[in-house]
Image: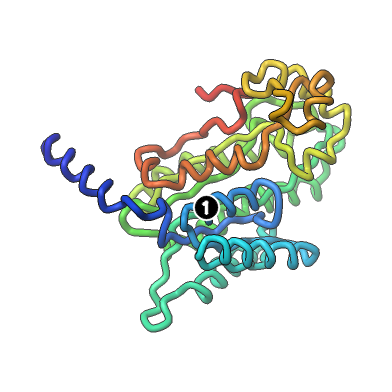
């Protein structure tokens, strides 16, 4: 296609898109959607017109996730359903995809397309190398590595056939920075990034595949970290360009703690914004990348 022809085609596509939300008619499956980054991703995608499958694991999250699904459906005129499935089990990922198909397949033809997958569910725990045991290793790798792999396997028959699909894997700066006590957790995230690059090649006809790598994020998990952990992070946070606190803008608790912690953590909405960006049509020429979602905690290379 000549350049003028391409320019006219692009202009036509933009005109057709005018007046509609950027993810209108799409369906996304977000794992670990009951709280934190996962819930923020769901809110962002729903606001862009995307219908949702909100995955969660524990019984204690059932009411919270059901309520979030109902709120998003009412607020944005989308369809949203909560699905309980353990991403760390051998059968949970396939159950999640099967449940999505049961809820969203065309009632007459059975046609079903899963446009977006966000592999967000993860578990984190720190142990010195001398203290790592088989159970610790298996738990983290089952959820953080095997779970995304089995989910993508189960979703393969339902991915788009025109490269419009999107897979976004939520990694961590821990994959690259070698923090103490993270032999296993950091290894799981490095494995997820390796799978991101492989899937980008294997699935190129179906979808793009990218990862994002948050640093510290203001979630329940971060709130539960020790002062020792925050002290370990402080030298990194001090050198993070966007972590400098802004009085009157940032949460008071982060302003008060900034001198000790070196700055503020990210807000979950900031991670969700980068994920949503990679889910859109404009990100169609980006694949196999680990995209910075950490305020400069780690510069991407």
Q: Position of residue 218 (x, y in %)?
A: 73, 38
Identify the residue shown where x is 35% and y is 38%: 285
User: For the point 62% across and 42% down, which residue is it?
Assistant: 269
Q: Give whichever of 232, 295 is nearer the camera.
A: 295
* Residue sitting at x 58%, y 56%: 30
Number of numbered markers: 1
Above-or-below relation of 41 to 225: below
Q: Residue furthest bottom?
A: 108
Q: Depth check: 26 or 212 in front?
A: 26
Helix, strand or loop status at disc 1: helix
Above or below residue 140? Residue 83 is: below
Residue lying at 70% horizontally and 48% vertically, measured from the top left: 36
Q: Is residue 97 visible?
A: yes
Position of 74 with respect to 21 (left or right) is right
Which of these two is toward me, 283 or 207? 283
Side (left or right) of 272 relative to 167: right
Q: Which residue is mark 1?
A: 45
Q: Residue 5: x, y in percent?
A: 12, 41
Residue 200 locus on image (x, y percent): 42, 43
């Amino acid at each position: 296609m000549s350049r003028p022809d391409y320019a006219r085609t692009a202009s036509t596509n933009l005109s057709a898109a005018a007046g509609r939300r950027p993810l209108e008619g799409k369906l996304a499956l977000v794992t670990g959607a009951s709280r934190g980054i996962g819930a923020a991703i769901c809110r962002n995608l729903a606001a862009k017109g995307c219908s949702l499958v909100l995955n969660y694991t524990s019984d204690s999250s059932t009411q919270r996730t059901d309520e979030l699904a109902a709120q998003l459906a009412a607020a944005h005129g989308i369809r949203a359903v909560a699905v309980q499935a353990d991403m760390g089990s051998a059968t949970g990922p396939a159950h999640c995809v099967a449940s999505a198909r049961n809820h969203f397949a065309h009632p007459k033809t059975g046609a079903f397309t899963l446009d977006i997958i966000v592999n967000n569910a993860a578990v984190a725990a720190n142990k010195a190398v001398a203290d790592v045991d088989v159970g610790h290793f298996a738990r983290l790798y089952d959820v953080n590595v095997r779970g995304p792999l089995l989910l993508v396997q189960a979703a393969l028959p339902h991915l788009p056939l025109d490269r419009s699909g999107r897979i976004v894997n939520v990694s961590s700066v821990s994959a690259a920075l070698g923090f103490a006590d993270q032999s296993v957790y950091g290894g799981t995230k490095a494995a997820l990034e390796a799978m991101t690059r492989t899937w980008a090649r294997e699935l190129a006809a179906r979808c793009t595949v990218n990862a994002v790598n948050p640093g510290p994020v203001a979630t329940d998990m971060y709130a539960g970290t020790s002062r020792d952990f925050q002290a370990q992070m402080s030298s990194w946070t001090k050198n993070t360009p966007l972590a400098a606190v802004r009085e009157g803008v940032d949460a008071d608790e982060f302003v008060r703690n900034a001198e000790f912690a070196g700055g503020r953590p990210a807000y979950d909405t900031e991670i969700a914004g980068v994920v949503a960006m990679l889910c859109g049509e404009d990100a169609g020429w980006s694949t196999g990348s680990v995209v910075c979602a950490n305020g400069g905690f780690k510069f991407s290379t």
